[in-house]
Image (cartoon, rainbow, N blue to C red):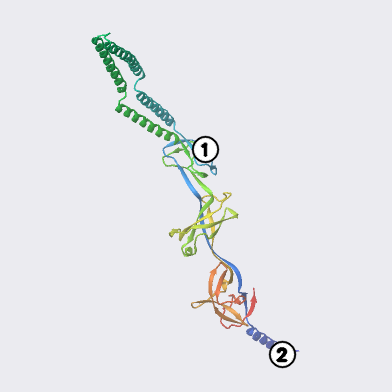
Amino acid sequence: MKRGLLILIPLAGAAWLVWLLAGRDAAPEVSFVRAGRMTLVSLITTNGRVEPRERHAVHAETAALIARVHVEQGQTVAAGAPVVTLAAPESDSLLASARARLETAQAALAALERGGPAREIAALEGAIGLLKVERQAAAREAASLERLVNQKAATRAELDAAKDRLARLDADLAAQQGRRAALVETDEAAAAQARVREAEAALALAERRAAGSTLRAPAAGVVYELAARAGDWLTPGALVARVGRLDPITVTVYVDEPDLGRIRPQLEVRITWDALPGRAWTGRVERVPTQVAPLGSRQVGEVLVVAANEDQALPPGANINAEIRAETVENALAVPKEALQRNGPATGVYVLAGTRLTWRPVRTGVSTVTHAQVIEGLNEGDAVALPGARALAEGALVTPVYR
């Protein structure tokens, strides 16, 4: 029995030694992928803030009490629609007084243009009419006497007396007509016209003040902010409401300074909002930044994006997430980014040559979060090693495991 044990012990040791040596010579397993074709979309992921496409503010011009609010937040209004009415009873009394003053001034001017007060005008016009009748009779009598004098049937004295009477009537008529014209002097008419203009200006001011008691929407849009309530006291310049267009909307997207060189107009932007996790909006870059400014600990440029918002579900002031499609390459030869290695100044990959690794420098292009485009250095289908527990090295013997 002891002799049998002595024989088995050396045999077991020999078997263990053979297994150990075989394990040392076995090539380690290394993960590989094939370089393949795919569409690569280079994204810039950042954040931003929603603003109306067009926005207008309604402010109080004077101090006043709000008597009535005509709109609700979220309501669509037309240009000129009343937003609030202010309590201003003094405006109505000032307007009535201004209208009365204008009517008085207009009546005075009309009287002057007609020639003065109606009673005096009537008396003068009556006197002028009588003088005209008397003159016509005197003219006929003088003409008749002149014929009779020629026929020796009347005396020269009678004719001279008739002519004198005609001359006196002409003088009286001229005097009355002069009095009629003198009732309206140029200076008096000009003063009356000035009083009318002054009354018109006062009425216009009163009308503006009365109209100012109703604050109106400066443009068509949605009341996306309503800062006033009935009974509030407004100070001059106080905000009452904001009105704007919510479809499309403007989104200010904050892009970090290193990525600004990749931004250009018309790039597609995908917008999401944490408050509506299942929704996404699509927009396009309308304007690139003109300056870089601090935003917290970041240095950013403000990229202006315009996006459709047909159901107006994305409200002004919302803090959104944005993905800018900076570049898209179709049918790009690509490898996982983790396969890229640095060897001094060069970037490359380890490819499988038979059963060993070989270093291959490459030139890369567009990259995404997971993959990088290879422009030079690889062919489609090449087996590219992925880093693992063991360091990769030129000429290393490996057992490939494809994933």
Q: Quadrant of the N terminus?
A: bottom right
| Residue 6: assigned label | 2
Q: Amino acid at mark 1?
A: His
Quote the CA–CA distance across marks 2 and 1: 108 Å
Q: Quadrant of the C terminus?
A: bottom right
In the rendered structure, the answer to whether residue 170 lies left or right of residue 81 reads left
Q: Residue at x 50, y 47 (%)?
A: 244
Horizontal and vertical percent for residue 321? 54, 57
Q: Nearer the viewer, residue 242 or 321?
A: 242
Instruction: Say which of marks 2 and 1 sits in front.
Output: 1
Q: Which residue is mark 1?
A: 70
Where in the figure is residue 329, as x and y percent of width and height? 56, 67
| Extreme residue toward the left, this view | 157
Query: How many C-alpha atoms fall within 10 Å of the one at disc 2: few (<14), some, or many (≥20)?
Result: few
* Percent position of residue 401, x then y: 64, 76
Going by the numbered disc 2, the residue's amino acid type is Leu
**Residue shown at 69% from the left, 89% from the top:** 10
Which residue is nearer to you in this view: 193 or 402? 193
| Rendered image quadrant of residue 183 | top left
Task: From the top left corner, tell me how far across and down residue 246 is, in percent.
Answer: 53, 49
Q: Is residue 318 above or below residue 330?
A: above
Residue 33's quadrant in the figure?
Answer: bottom right
